Amino acid sequence: MDLLKTLVDKGLRRELPTRDEALAVLATSDDELLDVVAAAGKVRRQWFGRRVKLNYLVNLKSGLCPEDCSYCSQRLGSKADILKYTWLKPEEAAAAAGAGVAGGAKRVCLVASGRGPTDRDVDRVSKTIEAIKQENEGVEVCACLGLLSGGQAERLRTAGADAYNHNLNTAEATYGDICTTHDFSDRVETVKQAQAAGLSACSGLIAGMGESDADLVDVVFALRAMDPDSVPVNFLIPFEGTPLAQEWTLTPQRCLRILAMVRFVCPDVEVRLAGGREIHLRTLQPLALHLANSIFLGDYLTSEGQAGRTDLEMIADAGFEVEGAGTTTLPRHRLDAAAGCGSPEGGCASHDGGCGTHEGGAAADEGACAGHAGGCGPCGEQPAAAAPARTDLVAVRRRGAGTDLAPNA
Ligand code: SF4
C-alpha cells in the first residue's frame, strides 16, 4: 500500500501526514489491518524500541464533580455506583503510589475530580508529591487536577511534579456536545500553562463518544499542534448511570486503526494506551503494544482494569519489555528541544478520559468509509456488524485508593 509506505517514511522523519492520509488510515479495511499495525509498528520501534512504559493511577478524590462531562462517571448528576471520597491524605496516596511502583510503574498519575484545584488543593497535592518522591526514588509524578489558574502550574513544578495531564478529549467543533460547563479553549489554555511552567505536558483523547473520523483527526491534529510529550488514547467506558452508557460503537479493529493514526500523526511522542483498552480491544490488546509505547498498570480511576500481573504477562508474551526506571522515555531530540526552548517541538503528548485522566471510555464510525460502520463508501468492504454492548466487562473499582482493600498493581 502506497499509503502505508508514505506514512512510515513520514513517521521516521517526524513529518506530519496530511489530514487525508490520517483519514485514510481510519478507513482501511479489516483485511488491511495487520499491514496498518505493522507499518505504524515500524514508527513506534524507531522512536521507542520494544519498551513499554507503565503508569499508575491514584485517584486522590473521587466523584461529586460539579462539571458535566458526559463520558465521566464522576460528573454532576452521575448515577454510576462508583467510590466517592474526598482527598486522600498524603501518606495514603503515597502508599497507593508505592504499590504501583513496586508493580513496575515508572510514573504515578495523581488525579482529582473537580473543575480545577484551589490553592489549598495545590498545597495538599504538593505535600503528596513530596511524600511520594521521598519514598520512591526516581519515580515520575504527573498531576491531573483539572483546569489550572495563575501560578498553580509553577507551584506544582516547584513541589516536584514532572508532568501535568489535561486531555483535549474530542474535537473543538463538537466539544459542546460532550460538555457544557467548560470549553475546548479552557483545556488548551491549561496545557499551555503547564508547558510554560516547565512541566511535561500530557494530553490526549477519548474515542467512542459518537464522533466522526474527521473529528478524531481534528483532535489528534490539535494535539500535535500543542505538542505534548505524551498522548493518552482512551476508549469510552460506557458507565451505567452516565449519558453515554449506550455508546458501544467501538470494535477491536477500530481501536487499532485509531491508535495507528495517532502514532502516524505523533510519531515520536509517548502514545499511551489508556482507559477502556480491556473492554474494547479485548483479546487484541497485545497488538496495540505495536502502536502504543505506554499503558496504565492495573486499575483506572473508577473502573477496574485487568490484573496488574496480567498486564506484565501480556507485555512479555508479546515480545516487549517494561521500561526501566533508568531509561529515558522520550527520544533524545525531544529532550534537547525541551531543554532549549522550554517548549517541546516536532511531535505532539493524560485525566484518563475525564479532565485529563478522568477516565472515559468509546467512538462512532462515520465519514467517508469510516471503518465500515453504517454503510460503506469507496472501499467496497461490507460494513462490520455494530459492536455488541458488553456491560458485563465494565467493573466499578472497589479496591485500592479510598478502600481498605489492596490495590491492583
Ligand atoms: S472529567 Fe473531570 S471535570 Fe469532567 S466531570 Fe469528570 S472529574 Fe469532572
Image (spheres, rainbow, N blue to C red):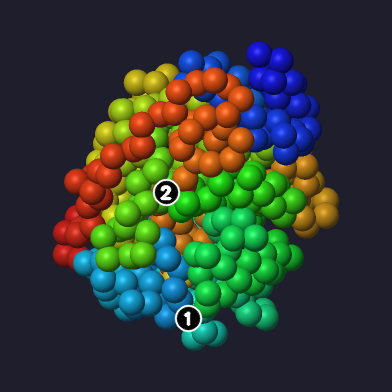
The answer to whether residue 99 is seen in the rendering is no
Under circle 1, the secondary element is: helix
In the image, what residue type sits under mark 2? Ala
Number of other residues with Cα within 10 Å of mark 2, as a class: few under 14, some 14 to 19, many 20 or more: many
Report x, y in % for residue 172.
65, 60
Please, which residue is most extreme toward the right here? Answer: 340
Q: Which residue is tagged 1?
A: 121
Image position of 120 with respect to 300: above or below: below
Give the residue at x 48% y 16%: 31
Report x, y in % for residue 44.
60, 28
In the picture, the disc for residue 325 is none
Ligand 1: image quarter: bottom left
Give the residue at x 31% y 72%: 78
Report x, y in % for residue 74.
35, 69
- Check contact, mark 2 vs mark 1: CB within 8 A: no
Task: Judge from the rendering whether residue 196 lies leftward or rightward of residue 93; answer left or right.
Answer: right
Q: Which is more foreground, mark 2 or mark 1?
A: 2
Report x, y in % for residue 295.
44, 41
Please, which residue is most extreme toward the left here? Answer: 404
Q: In the rendered image, which quarter contains the N terminus? A: top right
Q: Which residue is tagged 2?
A: 362
- Tell me which label, 2 or 1, sits earlier in the chain: 1
Task: Judge from the rendering whether residue 245 lies leftward or rightward of residue 127; answer left or right.
Answer: left
In the image, what residue type sits under mark 1? Asp
